[in-house]
């Protein structure tokens, strides 16, 4: 483990650049919640935004030229992009609804962004907009239901998301060309945080379907089928699953009974399990380095105030 950065203030949301050479994150190091970029070895920190309002939810574009984020600088949370060098700030959304910080995603070709709006009556829906600006399009209009957590398929043709209604949360997949929606799960269990495998064949997600109040990670074919429980340790609660770029490893956070959460890695082929961190502090928010460095993770640690660390 290498500590990339430590601060008396909060550093959160580390995200690798597509080439694996830089990490973007959100920090309060200078009093505001702003967007920063550092080299992969922790050197050369660069502050990209400087505004009293909250900036958060930073995501690299697929080509690494821009970052998307949400900001309250207009009075309510809106979606923005900025060039990787800090120039070219652009506001993409202008409606009265707010944009949810943790719910936007670049399309694989970088031409669009999916995002979630929150209306004044607390209705949540998925929209899409061109990354260079334009009129957003509403994708989900479920009656008396909320749609959140949109995630593009690797080929950009489909969007997985979570539909919540009457205490139930299920996974849906929309084919974007036809707007047809199919149910990936349709039951009384709470399922959330979908993430695609790199080949698009499966979706990994969190669910309570193992029974009781314990969250496990499951994998289901993206064209439908049975969900397979990937994490089955009875005393642990497992979440925040993220699949490596080569599709071979699943990193996740496990709350071991009576102990702070630690990071684990599961080989999706032979199911070999490895504990990656063994500190006495909370370890969370794992993010894989891109495919060429698939054995490296950035994550957040509470071992010291607001540490961002790298695990290789």
Image (cartoon, rainbow, N blue to C red):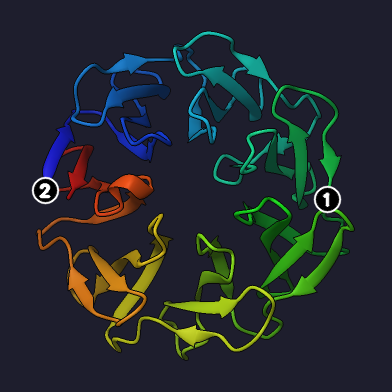
Residue 233 percent across, percent down from the top left: 29, 86
Residue 267 screen position, x and y as percent? 30, 73
How many numbered dots are placed on residues in this image? Answer: 2
Q: Which mark is residue 285?
A: none
Q: Give the side of residue 145 with respect to residue 301, left or right.
A: right
Percent coordinates x, y for residue 217 in the rendering? 43, 75
Tell me which residue sits at (49%, 32%) in the image.
56
Disc 2 to disc 1, C-alpha distance:
42 Å
Q: Is 126 above or below relative to 52?
A: below
Q: Position of residue 195 (x, y in %)?
A: 53, 61
Q: Earlier in the sequence, mark 2 or mark 1?
A: 2
Q: Quick check: 207 above or below 20? A: below
Q: Residue at position x 38%, y 58% from top?
A: 244
Viewer-proximal residue among 137 and 176: 176
> What residue lies at 68% left-to-right and 81% top-to-bottom?
224
Decide which of 174, 192 is in the foreground and name it: 174
Name the secondary structure under disc 2: loop
CB contact under 8 Å: marks 2 and 1: no
Q: Residue at x 78, y 41 (%)?
A: 120
Is 49 located above or below residue 219 in the figure?
A: above
Q: Nearer the viewer, residue 300 or 312?
A: 312
* Residue 256 picture quarter: bottom left
Residue 139 image label: 1
Work out whether residue 206 or residue 19 is closer to the camera in this orientation and state it: 19
- Secondary element at image label 1: loop
Relative side of 176 to 101, left or right:
right
Circle 1 Cα neighbour tier, 10 Å, few/some/many (<14 / 14–19 / ≥20)? some
Q: Assess disc 2: are there few (<14), some (14-19) or many (≥20) residues with their C-alpha within 10 Å of its C-alpha.
A: few
Query: Mark on residue 1?
Result: 2
User: Quick check: 80 left or right of 42?
Assistant: right
């Amino acid at each position: 483990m290498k500590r990339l950065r430590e601060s008396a203030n909060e550093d959160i949301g580390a995200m690798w650049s597509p080439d694996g050479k830089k990490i973007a994150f959100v920090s309060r190091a200078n009093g505001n919640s702003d967007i920063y970029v550092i080299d992969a070895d922790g050197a050369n920190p660069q502050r990209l935004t400087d505004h009293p309002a909250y900036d958060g939810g930073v995501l690299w574009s697929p080509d690494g030229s821009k970052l998307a984020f949400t900001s309250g600088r207009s009075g309510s949370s809106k979606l923005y992009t900025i060039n990787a060098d800090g120039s070219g700030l652009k506001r993409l959304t202008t409606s009265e609804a707010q944009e949810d910080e943790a719910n936007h995603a670049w399309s694989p070709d970088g031409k669009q962004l999916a995002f979630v709006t929150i209306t004044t009556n607390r209705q949540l829906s998925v929209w899409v907009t061109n990354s260079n600006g334009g009129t957003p399009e509403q994708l989900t209009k479920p009656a008396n239901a909320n749609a959140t957590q949109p995630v593009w398929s690797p080929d950009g043709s489909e969007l997985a998301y979570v539909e919540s209604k009457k205490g139930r949360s299920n996974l849906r997949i929309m084919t974007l060309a036809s707007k047809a929606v199919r149910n990936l799960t349709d039951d009384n269990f709470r399922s959330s945080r979908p993430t695609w495998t790199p080949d698009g064949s499966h979706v990994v997600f969190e669910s309570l379907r193992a029974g009781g109040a314990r969250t496990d990670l499951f994998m289901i074919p993206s064209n439908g089928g049975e969900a397979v429980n990937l994490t089955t340790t009875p005393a642990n609660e497992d979440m925040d699953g993220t699949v490596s770029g080569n599709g071979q490893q699943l990193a996740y956070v496990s709350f071991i009974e009576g102990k702070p959460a630690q990071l684990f890695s599961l080989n999706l082929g032979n199911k070999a399990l490895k504990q990656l961190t063994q500190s006495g502090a909370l370890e969370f928010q794992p993010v894989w380095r891109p495919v060429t460095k698939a054995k490296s993770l950035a994550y957040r640690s509470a071992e010291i105030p607001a540490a961002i660390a790298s695990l290789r």
